[in-house]
Image: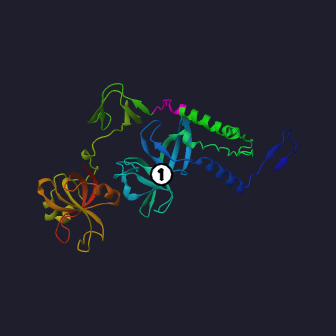
Amino acid sequence: MNVSSGNDPSPAIRVRISPLVLSFLAFSLSASAQTALPTETSVHGAPNGPQIGTLKRAAIVRVGASQNGWTAVTIEGWIVSTRLGARKDTLDRTIIGTGNATIRTADGMGQPVVGDLEPSTILKRLSERNGWTQVRRSAWIKSSALQAAAPSARATGNGQRAGNGQRATGDGQRGARSAERPALSAERAASSADRTAPNDSATQRTTRATSLRSAPNGAERASVKAGATVEALAHESGWARVRIEGWVPERDLMIADSSADMGLSAADLRADPAAHRGKTVRWEVQVIAVQHADPLRRSLAPDEPYLLARGPGDEGAVLYIAIPRTLLEKVQALPQLSTVMITARVREGRSAPVGAPLLDLISIAK
């Protein structure tokens, strides 16, 4: 500290802070914004909104503002890149496939798990390496999930001091009850706050039946009933870009892929294998059996699981459909000779040794 007194009636005091101290302060500010969750908790896209996943106990999140019993958090981590698809006209990613995607603290299957996120969850891409993508997502959790349970005092029958410093009595263990009371009060307060409807300006309801359009004054995509809940994402010239969530039969969906060709048959693939490699098909097929590749199936990796099927439709051709590990349990549960709808990408139009088309399964629905 330097003090200059000269002729200045109000001496100036100049304080020099070393770079080491500045670094420590910056680290402290950064660290204070991060919290380890004391318990496993669900994570939502908006206050009182649909659940988009689950965060594990001790997961590190960056905590933001709170409102009406909900707290904003920022999640960061790494997801296997094959579970992510690109969103049109953005650098964002969305979780694809069936089943939740695991997010980890670093790139590697052995790294600690942050949580699980549901399919279609939108994520911001930060970086990529070694088949993994680093992502970030802002979301909401219940504020009560951030409140660690207060330690309860352990009382003994012989009058020893309880954990909170009070002497427990033999008849009622007053010290233990006293220690538990603040935790119960906090729990009741959180429960009361959770019952309060959040005032989230981004979450709105339609006042009348309206059309969902591709752009302002664009083509109609769907109709939305009065009272439907939507999330406003952007505003332009009297129009709002919204997100609406709901459920449709899985059988009625396929991935948005510009290479999809709905008219392709198994005969087309066998006739010109090179021309159709990489294209996406949507076929109805009959389940025969789940098998693992032997050395003769040279187009498949050793011991790779695949569905032996017949189709598409009435064509009745023999098909090999390679099954990713994320869908294996679901496919194994299918009854033999059941009919399913698949979306798959063509690996080989005519595989060795029998010439059956070989596809990579993307999704499957009864």
Q: Residue at x 64, y 48 (%)?
A: 29
Is 173 drawn above or below residue 238 in the view shown?
Answer: below
Q: In terms of image quadrants, where is residue 193?
A: top right
Q: Nearer the viewer, residue 77 or 4?
A: 77
Q: Residue at x 43, y 37 (%)?
A: 49
Q: Nearer the viewer, residue 317 or 277?
A: 317
Q: Nearer the viewer, residue 201 or 343?
A: 343
- Residue 164 at what x, y percent from top left? 71, 43
- Residue 248 at what x, y percent from top left? 29, 41
Q: Nearer the viewer, residue 109 or 209?
A: 109
Total of numbered circles in the picture?
Answer: 1
Disc 1 crowd rating (10 Å Cα; few below 14, some 14-19, many 20+) is many
Given the current orientation, which residue lies at the most extreme bottom position? 295
Residue 199 shown in magenta: yes
Secondary structure mainly formed by the magenta segment: loop
Q: In terms of image quadrants, where is residue 299?
A: bottom left
How did the renderer colour the structure? rainbow
- Residue 154 at what x, y percent from top left? 67, 46
Is 211 drawn above or below residue 343 in the view shown?
Answer: above
- Residue 215 at what x, y percent from top left? 32, 37
Left or right relative to 259: residue 114: right
Q: Which amino acid lies under the numbered mark 1 shown in the image of this protein?
A: Gly
Residue 148 shown in magenta: no
Given the current orientation, which residue lies at the most extreme left position? 314
- For disc 1, the marked residue is 115
Label 1: which secondary element: strand
**Start-end of magenta stretch:** 192-201
